[in-house]
Amino acid sequence: MEKKVLTSETKVRPRFSEIDAMTIVWHGNYVKFLEDGREDFGIKYGLDYMSVYEAGYMTPLVKMNIEYKAPVFYGQEITVETAFINSPAAKIVFEYKIFCVKTGNILTTATTQQVFINAETRELELTPPPFFIEWKKNNGLEI
Amino acid sequence: MEKKVLTSETKVRPRFSEIDAMTIVWHGNYVKFLEDGREDFGIKYGLDYMSVYEAGYMTPLVKMNIEYKAPVFYGQEITVETAFINSPAAKIVFEYKIFCVKTGNILTTATTQQVFINAETRELELTPPPFFIEWKKNNGLEI
Amino acid sequence: MEKKVLTSETKVRPRFSEIDAMTIVWHGNYVKFLEDGREDFGIKYGLDYMSVYEAGYMTPLVKMNIEYKAPVFYGQEITVETAFINSPAAKIVFEYKIFCVKTGNILTTATTQQVFINAETRELELTPPPFFIEWKKNNGLEI
Amino acid sequence: MEKKVLTSETKVRPRFSEIDAMTIVWHGNYVKFLEDGREDFGIKYGLDYMSVYEAGYMTPLVKMNIEYKAPVFYGQEITVETAFINSPAAKIVFEYKIFCVKTGNILTTATTQQVFINAETRELELTPPPFFIEWKKNNGLEI
């Protein structure tokens, strides 16, 4: 049985202020593009910052890997493809591919890992919170 | 009688990520330099974010003017001179001068205006909060 | 005779990374929204960074004024209205209004002033460059 | 024989604008702290952006890994320890540790990998450029 993979696509037009002295997007600004992708995914499937916060949690990043394969230039339109990587752990893992809209070439790949902390006590949740299990069920994912 | 003017000086080394495709500091990044200056002033005289917050207030900006007279390049060291402009109003007004450390030339001038809002109710304070009047007294300023 | 005013509208969704500890958009991030508006205007009317650069010029900002009338929160959609303010000077002046999409309330007003510098020599142009006069003609503006 | 490891230390005071709605440093801003560390290392040992550029090269990032172990709060002073990881490849690899100045606890670890591209042709260098071999020799590192 093939596993279901939830994905979303986000078009991004880099800002002039995101271009560096090498006339390419500064590598640190990709973190914003990943967040654009993650948040669009969240809005599409109901896992955005506000929904998570209203459920009583915050989800800080604990790991981030980025591989820059080709630069992004000013005026170049890109698409962030965000895929939710399901696992039984108390974690949210996303994989990202950034494409050039014009050529379809992969420019960047990335992974992020988030944990759940209680919004009030700020303590780490060691098991998946009920709202997250519910969310998986509603979206046809294994628990 | 000459008025007392409180000032502070802050040395800033622009980051590579703050340089734009014209190989000069992107104009929006000066807002960070002004905040560096304002916060250094606050730490020197006891009017930093945390002190104000602990007194029960937040001080959002309501006005900002910047005049860019000469560009700042990568590797160029600059000094932000921050001066508190006293007035009887329920406002915090600062004037800034950014200098080139090497030549002493003025590169930028700026002004910001902040108001007081109650940190809990988020309501605007129409008169200077007691802690601010106290602060002025302690620093020998007119009320 | 009424003067023709060129305007453009840009929808912006503030990023999570643009929200500060007061849970509102950090005041310095509005500079990016103004640039979004200015660049959209440029793309609409042919005065974007790349067109200007290809004509042999760069247009650094020399003045910026922002008045913050109401905060912008996370999740709040805003519209930047960008208007070109025509004058015979060798300058590009824009006026901006930022609206709340939902209520239509004005949240921020701003003005920026840019000059022309020769992209190669980096010298200031004291008179309007030919391409700019041509641009005005093509868009039905007084010279 | 123990290998020589070049390291540098950089003190950083996070800016208010770098704090997010969770009142901790936004994860993407750590990329700036790593660049602060890398650039300080470069200035200390002669491998800063300008030196590399004057030698005819640019060194874009191709990989970045960050592990966030504990959050950084506003007002918390941190130290970035930057270590050059030597290898015979045409790459610059750095490992970073971010410490809390007060407690000495490790808050973050990170790795970055950079390649050499010819500043003029923008082509990738497949072997270590002469200036880089020279730099290693001058600093007592294996080639």
Image (cartoon, coloured by chain):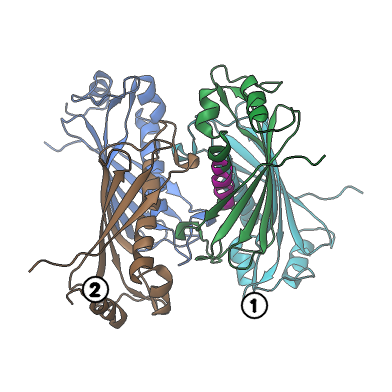
Chain colours: A green, B blue, C brown, D cyan
In the rendered image, which quarter is residue C126 located in?
bottom left
Q: Is residue D75 visible?
A: no
- State the residue position of label 2: C90
User: Position of B114 compared to D137: left or right?
Assistant: left
Q: Residue at x 69, y 53 (%)?
A: A109
- Quick one: which residue is furthest to the bottom in this view? C130
Which chain is home to disc 1? Answer: D
Q: Which mark is residue B36?
A: none
In the rendered image, which quarter is residue D50 located in?
bottom right
In the figure, B110 relative to A43: above or below? Answer: below
Label 1 is placed on what type of residue?
A: Thr
Q: Residue at x 58, y 67 (%)?
A: A102
Q: Position of residue D133 (x, y in %)?
A: 78, 67
- Quick one: which residue is furthest to the left in this view? C1
Q: Which mark is residue D121?
A: 1
Q: Position of residue A8 (x, y in %)?
A: 60, 46
Label 2, residues with CA under 10 Å away: few <14, some 14-19, many ≥20: some
Viewer-proximal residue, C32 or D120? C32
Span of residues in magenta: A30-40
Q: Residue at x 69, y 23 (%)?
A: A128
Dot 2 falls on a residue whose secondary structure is: loop
Viewer-proximal residue, B96 or D26? D26
In the figure, B45 relative to A43: above or below? Answer: above
Dot 1 falls on a residue whose secondary structure is: loop
Task: Decide whether the magenta segment is chiefly helix, strand or loop.
Answer: helix
Label 2 is placed on what type of residue?
A: Ala
Q: Position of residue C88 (x, y in %)?
A: 17, 73
> The C terminus of chain A appears in which quarter of the rendering?
top right
User: Position of C118 compared to A52: left or right?
Assistant: left
Which chain is home to disc 2? Answer: C
